[in-house]
């Protein structure tokens, strides 16, 4: 049980997928202008990533095995693309406004490297099924946390008196860098 | 090798079945008119209509927010199809698609009765003349605003387009307005 808790804490804070591993930066910069969209993107990514981690564990373990290990990346991409399509349909049905806000970034979850990265890290770390699921879920929670924090900061930055040359993307990049520095502070959290 | 093929085929078939099923289960009833208009549009997604793609333009037409003559890739044929579909009159390309040629006013001096009404209407004092005297237009001052045409009682003012030549030609501004739909 402690081990599972450690996986969650480690993926959310210590090895945060965006701030420490620097994966999934496209949606991190792209969908963080509005808090509402950031929450939606976080939720969609959480769904895809958790499902994707579980599915790719099953594929890796029962379908491919050591003989067909060279198919790992290929089959993961296919499965993730399928799950993203499924998620898109569900969101379009359940929340058209969220569908409108997420726009092009929703199908782009397919190419979000965090979503492919976590299943591959799972394979590398030889996690079992439960660990894989938790690793995926924790990673996605870390992604969502960072998205929400960053979107909140950017919403406030909109109203701030930013010097001309730092306006827009420049100040967002600097903010992201500072957040990354802050997340480095978690590295001593788990002994 | 064969097993690798079977594995990939198996994954593809399984995903295809799941997605096909959920496409039916989660089918969204869109506005059928939007889909019909979208089917007529050429799907070039070029944005020349001022909308970020064919579907947003179709949505705007269905909502009555856009004219049907804003799609150059569709051509006149496309406008005819849209007009048939919507039961509207055919609208040729014109306003918006092709800007009016620059022109200056011209007074037919044999018809002019010297009433000075056009002189009072001209905002840039480009009309020369006096009461009971024939008027004429200083072409270099005329802005082509057409404000002098309505007051003329004898309709002696016409607009003459200025042909482009080497002295007055210049690069067009790259105007490309993209409207937000949401």
Image (cartoon, coloured by chain):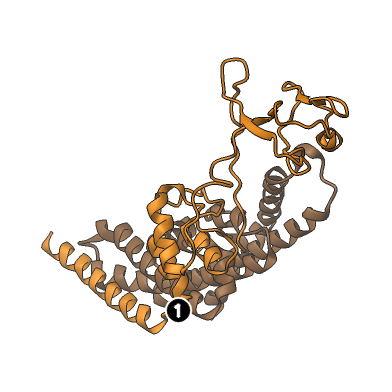
Instruction: From the top left corner, tell me how far across and down residue B158 is, in percent.
Output: 66, 34
Q: Nearer the viewer, residue B38 or B9?
A: B38
> For the view shown, which residue lies furthest in the top direction?
B167
Asked if one can make out residue A155 in the rendered structure from this viewpoint, the answer is yes
Name the residue at 39% across, 76% down.
Answer: A129
Which of the 4 image quarters holds residue A107? bottom left
Instruction: From the top left corner, tell me how far across and down residue A105 is, in percent.
Output: 52, 60
Q: Secondary structure at mark 1?
A: loop
Which of the 4 image quarters holds residue A155? bottom right
Relative to A19, does residue A57 appear above or below in the rendering?
Answer: below
Please count the marks in the image: 1
Q: Nearer the viewer, residue B175 or B128?
A: B128
Q: Which chain is orange?
A: B
Relative to B29, does residue B161 appear above or below in the rendering?
Answer: above
Name the residue at 45% across, 80% down.
Answer: B29
Instruction: From the top left corner, tell me how far across and down residue B105 is, in percent.
Output: 69, 31
> For the view shown, which residue lies furthest in the bottom direction?
B25
Q: Nearer the viewer, residue B61 or B151?
A: B151
How dense is the environment of label 1, judged by Cα within 10 Å: few (below 14), some, or many (20 and up)? Answer: some
Disc 1 marks which residue? B28
Q: For this view, does A3 lie left or right of residue A51?
A: right
Q: Quadrant of the C terminus of chain B?
A: bottom right
Q: Please, which chain is the residue tagged with disc 1 on? A: B
Asked if one can make out residue A10 in the rendered structure from this viewpoint, the answer is no
Q: Quadrant of the N terminus of chain B?
A: bottom left
Relative to B136, does residue A103 appear above or below in the rendering?
Answer: below
Q: Which chain is brown?
A: A
Q: Nearer the viewer, residue A99 or B15?
A: A99
Relative to A77, does residue B140 appear above or below in the rendering?
Answer: above
Q: For this view, does B154 lie left or right of residue B178?
A: right
């Amino acid at each position: 049980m402690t081990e599972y808790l450690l996986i969650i804490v480690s993926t959310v804070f210590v090895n945060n997928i965006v701030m420490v591993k620097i994966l999934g930066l496209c949606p991190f910069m792209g969908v963080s202008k509005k808090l509402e969209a950031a929450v939606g993107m976080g939720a969609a990514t959480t769904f895809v990533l958790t499902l994707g981690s579980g599915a790719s564990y099953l594929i890796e373990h029962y379908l491919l095995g050591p003989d067909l290990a060279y198919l790992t990346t290929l089959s993961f991409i296919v499965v993730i693309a399928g799950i993203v399509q499924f998620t898109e349909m569900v969101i379009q049905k359940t929340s058209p406004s969220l569908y409108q806000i997420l726009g092009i970034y929703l199908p782009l979850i397919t190419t979000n490297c965090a979503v492919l990265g976590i299943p591959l890290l799972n394979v590398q770390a030889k996690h079992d099924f439960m660990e894989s699921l938790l690793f995926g879920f924790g990673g996605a929670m870390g992604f969502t946390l960072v998205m929400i924090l960053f979107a909140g900061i950017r919403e406030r930055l909109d109203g701030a008196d930013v010097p001309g040359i730092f306006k827009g993307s420049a100040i967002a990049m600097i903010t992201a860098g500072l957040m990354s520095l802050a997340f480095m502070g978690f590295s001593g959290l788990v002994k | 090798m064969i097993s690798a093929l079977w594995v990939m085929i198996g994954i593809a078939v399984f995903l295809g079945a799941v997605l096909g099923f959920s496409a039916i289960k989660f089918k969204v009833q869109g506005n059928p008119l939007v889909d019909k208009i979208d089917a007529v549009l050429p799907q070039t997604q070029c944005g020349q209509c001022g909308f970020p793609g064919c579907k947003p333009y179709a949505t705007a037409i269905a909502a009555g927010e856009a004219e049907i003559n804003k799609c150059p890739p569709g051509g006149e044929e496309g406008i005819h199809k849209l007009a048939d579909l919507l039961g509207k009159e055919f609208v040729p390309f014109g306003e918006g698609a092709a800007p009016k040629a620059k022109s200056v006013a011209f007074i037919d001096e044999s018809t002019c009765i010297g009433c000075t009404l056009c002189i009072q209407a001209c905002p840039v004092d480009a009309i020369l003349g006096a009461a009971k005297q024939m008027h004429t237009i200083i072409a270099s001052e005329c802005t082509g605003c057409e404000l002098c045409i309505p007051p003329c009682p004898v309709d002696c003012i016409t607009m003459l387009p200025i042909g482009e030549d080497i002295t007055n030609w210049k690069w067009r501004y790259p105007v490309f307005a993209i409207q937000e739909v949401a």
